[in-house]
Amino acid sequence: MRWKWLFFGLLAAGVGLVWNNEKSRRELVSELNGARVFVNKVAKPYEAWQIIFISVGLTLLVTSLYSFLFREDQPLFARFKKSAFAIIRSLPIVKGKIKAELDKAKQSLENDNFVHVPGEKICLELPAKGLTAEEVLKEISDLNSIATVEWKKGWASGTAYNCSPELTALNKEVYGRFIWSNPLHVQIFPDVRKMEAEVVQWTVKIFNGGPDACGTMTSGGTESILMAMRAYRQAGYERGIRYPEIVCAETAHCAFKKAADYFKMKLTSIPVDPLSRKVNLRAMANAISSNTVVLIGSAPHFPHGIVDPIEEMAAIGRACGIGVHVDCCLGGFILPFMDKAGYPIPPFDFRVRGVTSISADTHKYGYTPKGTSVVMYSSQKLRRHQYFVETSWPGGVYATPTIAGSRPGALIATCWATMRFVGTDGYVDMARRIVGSARKIKAALKGIPGVFVMGDPQASIVAFGSKEFDIYRLYAAMTGKGWHLSSLQYPPSVHICLTAIHTEEGVVDRFIGDMKECAGVIMKTPKAKTTGMAAVYGTSQSIPDRSLVDDIAASFIDLCYRVRPPPPPPSSSEDPTRK
């Protein structure tokens, strides 16, 4: 935007200089007159209506071409590739084959993830008469029986971060007391307002914020990231940037891409070092343009648990006058306590000059119930850009700090209560136990033939891959043992995210033992073909047309919302052994 104004300013100045010189002015008038004669000569064979239609058509063609070539939200090559694949998919000979393969993949998703449990009750509509409390609780118990994964015993990566009986009992009591509260109504629920303000204040202090540092609570890490990116976008608008840009590592959380999509921002993804899994700082610096409004660092990032070089990124941001957001959604209540826990790490928070905002999830390692997070800013001026304010609505002046209007005050209350219950000593102790368990797993994996650890993870995530066999075979084998790990891509890898549950006696040793056993079996036939959903996941990475993968992923979400009657039982006259 600024370059365009500069161009037009220079053009106007040039015309002014030419017009002040009599000789130059005569030459300019002569050239313009010659152009007029030439245009009239060319247009002479055409009628007026034809000239109008040709002019409109050429204008539309040129503007469309300009829009395609110089759109700010996506690189030219990405848009060209997307358009080319769309044309290929529309060909009749290709269209049918693609549909058949997509239908197979979707059916496989349904068969593997949405199996009807015998005896499961399907409710397609409300009952004509409301049920009693006992009847509803009976149905709830029946629904609980569908879930078979032993997540409370530490079989799942991440998922649940603390489910101690004491904390569960406390949150049940607190939630019940604030079940109908809504912080939108500050005068009616001043207690909830006070608790939210205090949670933000505690979190800002944990991250070493200065006297002007501030923040808000949100519903989770994604909303915290969305709000921060909106703040930077609005700040960019104030500076005259029409198409604000985000620059981040390819390992940054997908919520940044969601923010770019929602808020019409351009996101530039920077490759990471293949060994350290840290962002390439030189490439990040080179990607900065006059439209860049924020650099993104992760502490740590989700795929491999690596902490980006925040101090170096902040130095780049300071030099360019650009904000730096640190995504601590995953490590937010682990990293701040690692020094006291005996695992020192480089500064990553507001102690680093140039860090202007941080997102941290209270509902992960803060151990609060799901549905709370905190987004923080180094200044109140930047936080203001996050707000939505409408002063002309007939319903009155409407102002909200985050996306939602009404919010569950009970979740704010349970967040407040949990943080009071755990305290600094509790967070330090949990950081010591979790990081210690992760280090134990990291050391053990380095000793398993055929397996290597991705980078040098410092906190709670340990990712691993293999150069000897398809890592998804190991993922499938561990799934067969009852583990639910996280499968990753680009490059193919798997990770486990440790929580308080994994620090219980025997969980880490069981994981290491199963890894050794499964990897040992696979190493006997390392080149064997991968089968099942593991093969589907691995194959999806090699599909060049990512829109096909988009379609499959969207179909999975469709299936999550589908409610249909159970399949009819086999007829008594039908032989159930026949297929």
Image (tube, helix red, strand yellow):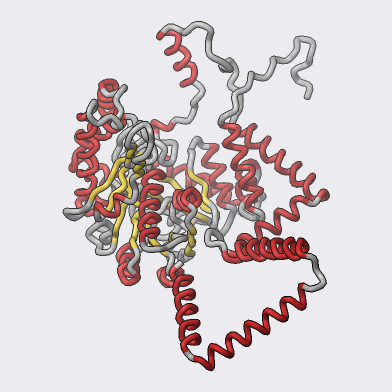
Q: Quadrant of the C terminus?
A: top right
Instruction: Kindly identify the residue that appears in the image at 44 percent across and 52 percent down.
Output: 256
Relative to residue 553, is residue 41 drawn left or right?
right
On the image, the x and y values in percent for residue 149 come to 48, 30
On the image, the x and y values in percent for residue 109 come to 63, 36
Instruction: Kindly identify the residue that appears in the image at 20 percent across and 34 percent down.
Output: 194
Q: Is residue 501 visible?
A: no
Instruction: Kindly identify the residue that appears in the image at 47 percent across and 78 percent down.
Output: 12
Name the foreground residue: 456 vs 417. 417
Occupied quadrant, residue 291? bottom left
- Vertical order, 334 against 557 (above or below): below
Instruction: Kindly identify the residue that appears in the image at 51 percent across and 91 percent down.
Output: 22
Name the foreground residue: 297 vs 17. 17
Name the foreground residue: 550 vs 476. 550
On the image, the x and y values in percent for residue 27 come to 58, 90
On the image, the x and y values in percent for residue 425 come to 18, 42
How many numbered marks are there?
A: 0
Relative to residue 574, is residue 107 drawn left or right?
left
Determine the residue located farthest toward the bottom in the rendered image: 23
- Vertical order, 9 against 57 (above or below): below
Occupied quadrant, residue 192? top left
Q: Is residue 404 visible?
A: yes
- Vertical order, 416 against 268 (above or below): above
